[in-house]
Structure formats: C-alpha cells, structure tokens
Image: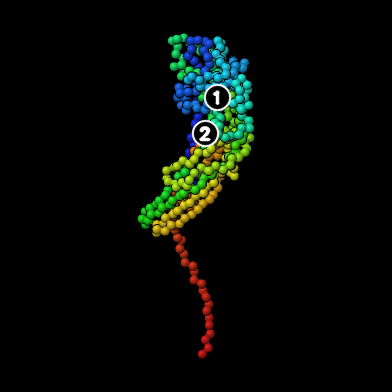
Amino acid sequence: MKKLFFIAVAALAMGACSKVQTVDIQKEINFEVANSLQTKATGSVYNNGAFGTYAWFNNTDEFMVNEKVDLTAGAWKTVDHTFYWPKTGSISFISYSPFEGTSNTAGATPVVTKDKITYTDVIVGTTDLMYADRATCSSNVNEVTDNDDAAAESGYSGVPTVFRHALAKLSFKVAANFIEWDDATTGSHTEWEITLNSFKIGGFNTKGDLELNLNADGKSWDKPVTTVGSTDYYVWNNTDGATTDQELVAAPVVLTTIPQDLASATGYVLPQILSAGVQTVKIDANIKTTLSNGKEINEHFVKTFNISDISTLKAWQMNENIVYTIKFKPTASALDPSLAHDDDPEDVTITFDPAVADWTLVDANATIQL
C-alpha cells in the first residue's frame, strides 16, 4: 500500500522599516499588520487578536516592555500607553502573538530580549504562537514633508509587523488508487469499495522549548536546528508529552479516487522529529471486492502505522502546513516493488504456475498360486 503526501509551506517575507508618512514629529507610533503590508508580503491578513511588543531606543534603552497592541479605530496601536516617535535615533521593535501578561511588565511566555525570543516548557494546544522579525525604524526618516509620500514609497503606514508561525499545522486527505478495473484481455470487470470506518492519529509530542536568536542581518531569527543523519530540521527542543488519539472520521467514509478531507487535527502541533512508535495513524477499514464472476468478498482491516513510515517526510517543521494525501490500494502489494502499479491492479493479477509432479514408482510384485 503506497501513501502519497503533499506539503504546503507558508513563509511570510519581512520588510525593513523605512519611512512613515507624517509631517508631525510627535506622531503616535502605530503598527501595520493589515492589508497593504500583507499584500506586499504575499501573506494573509493578521487575525490573531492583540499582540505584544518590545522596543529599544538606539538598540540600548528600553522603550516598550511587553506593550499590548490591538486594533483601535482602524489602526494597530498600543492599548495601555501612548508612544510617539522621538526626534533622533532609532527604535527596534520585536513583537509576538498572542499577547500574554501585562503591559510594561516583562512576560513569561515568551521571554523577549533585544536579541532573543525564548519559549520554555510550552504545552501546545489550540493557540497559534507567532513571532515577528525585528523592525528597526530611524526616527529621522519619519520627518517627511507634505510632498514626500513616504507611505507610497515604503508601502507601510506603521511599524511593519509580519508574523511567522512558531508551530505547525497538520491535516489529512484520503483517496483510493482505483475502484474499478477492466481487463483488456478477458474484458472482465472488477470493482472495489473501500470504506474507512476510523482514522485516528496520536502520540505527538506536545511540550517543548524554543529559542530564537537574532540573525546577523539584524532582523530575522535563527531557528533551532536538529540534525538527523545528514539532514537539518527546524524543530523545537526538549520535546516530550504525548497526545491522546484524535478521531478524524465522524462517520464511515467511502473512498473515491478524488482526495477527500478528513476532519482537521485539533489545534496546532509541536514541530518535531517523526520517530517509529511515537506518532501513529490507526486505521479501521473494510474492502468489498465484486469479482468479475459476480461474487463478492469482504475484508476487514485494523492496523497501526508509524507516520514516519507512510511518507518520506521525517519531521514537522516550524511554520509548515503539512497536508498528508494518503491513497489506499485495494489489492495486495506487489512482491516486487519495481513492478508495482499505483493506479491499476496489474501487479497483483492472480496467475498460475502449473507443473506436473513426477510419477511415483510403486513395485507391486505379487505371487499367485494356482
């Protein structure tokens, strides 16, 4: 049985802060996470509620400490305190989502410094944890004249804040490789009906640590790297815990050759290495075969698979939306994988290998007395 997968990876680009349109050096500081910035970044509109931000003046003096930023009257602004652009110097901003704690008090999740973001002992659930690259804005370029349309030049009307996902998402699609076949030689027709009764996933690690360090470019973050063999994966560290099984089939699903969506996995998954015996798929299925002679056979399967074995994917990484498309082949696997046909049953057509056993010589000597 061969399983296929497709991975869609959502990666948002981050723009450096440039001019902000204003003719008043006392203009209030606001943030841009809405349409124009998202279009520029080819991403999606931010909709994760209030977020937190930290800022440093000239990358030295604390300017904002875990300030809550929310959408107010059409602009993203700090909620509990009002801040204005200074006359000189620059301000460096680091934001995370969703907001936790209290404004002007350093938060515990995550811990943010001017060159590091740290998540410790985080239990992953339904919260979409996100972080933004650092945006450094020079206050002197905010002094523009009426004729200098800075917003048009930069595409921003506030501190550019494009978030990246610290976790991963997971979903599954199911389909049949084939559900009928006509033999070209005999003209016979065979049909298969595959019913998926249950599809459970479980065993994922749910707790871990993440440390992001500022890259030499001064804005992006170096993700943690775990090397398995010769391959690097961007996953969280010190992972443990495990999810209980999640049932993704609400009612029996009859497979077609067109992939069908199963119910979504609950919440988000911790970026992690896939290991045998840890992350699993448990399947309960029936296969009804209508033979070319009109008879039927019914088979029932209950089997557990390692997720690490059903595709070549060996890790769920940060900011990835992983979609497994699993195709079920309703016939036995080919003895010789090189002869396997994904979309037809030709590799397992029943054939015969006739031979005649040698005669057994029996010495039947007898004596007849007359």
Task: Look at 41% across and 52% down and name the residue there.
Answer: 191
Task: Look at 58% across and 42% down and name the residue there.
Answer: 244
Q: Quadrant of residue 242?
A: top right
Task: Compute the Cα span from label 1 to label 2.
Answer: 21 Å
Judge from the rendering whether residue 107 lies leftward or rightward of residue 252; answer left or right.
right
How many C-alpha atoms fall within 10 Å of the one at disc 1: few (<14), some, or many (≥20)?
Answer: many
Q: Is residue 21 above or below residue 10?
A: above
- Pair 1/2: label in front: 1
Disc 1 is placed on an element classified as strand
- Residue 37: x and y in percent read 47, 22
Can see residue 300? yes
Task: Look at 51% across and 22% down and name the residue there.
Answer: 71
- Residue 42: x and y in percent read 46, 26
Q: Which residue is denoted by mark 1 in the rendering?
A: 51
Task: Look at 55% across and 42% down and name the residue there.
Answer: 246
- Residue 88: x and y in percent read 56, 11
Q: Is residue 75 above or below residue 212?
A: above
| Residue closest to the far bottom | 370
Please name whichever residue, 348 or 47, is drawn nearer the observer in this view of the structure.
Answer: 47
Can see residue 327? no
Disc 2 is placed on an element classified as strand
Q: Is residue 132 above or below residue 205?
A: above
Please name whichever residue, 188 or 48, is drawn nearer the observer in this view of the structure.
Answer: 48
Image coloring type: rainbow
Q: Which residue is denoted by mark 2 in the rendering?
A: 320
- Residue 194: x and y in percent read 45, 49
Q: Quadrant of residue 136?
A: top right
Name which of mark 1 and mark 2 comes first in the sequence. Answer: 1
Please name whichever residue, 82 or 35, is drawn nearer the observer in this view of the structure.
Answer: 82
* Amino acid on which disc 2 is placed: Glu
Q: Is residue 97 above or below residue 147?
A: below
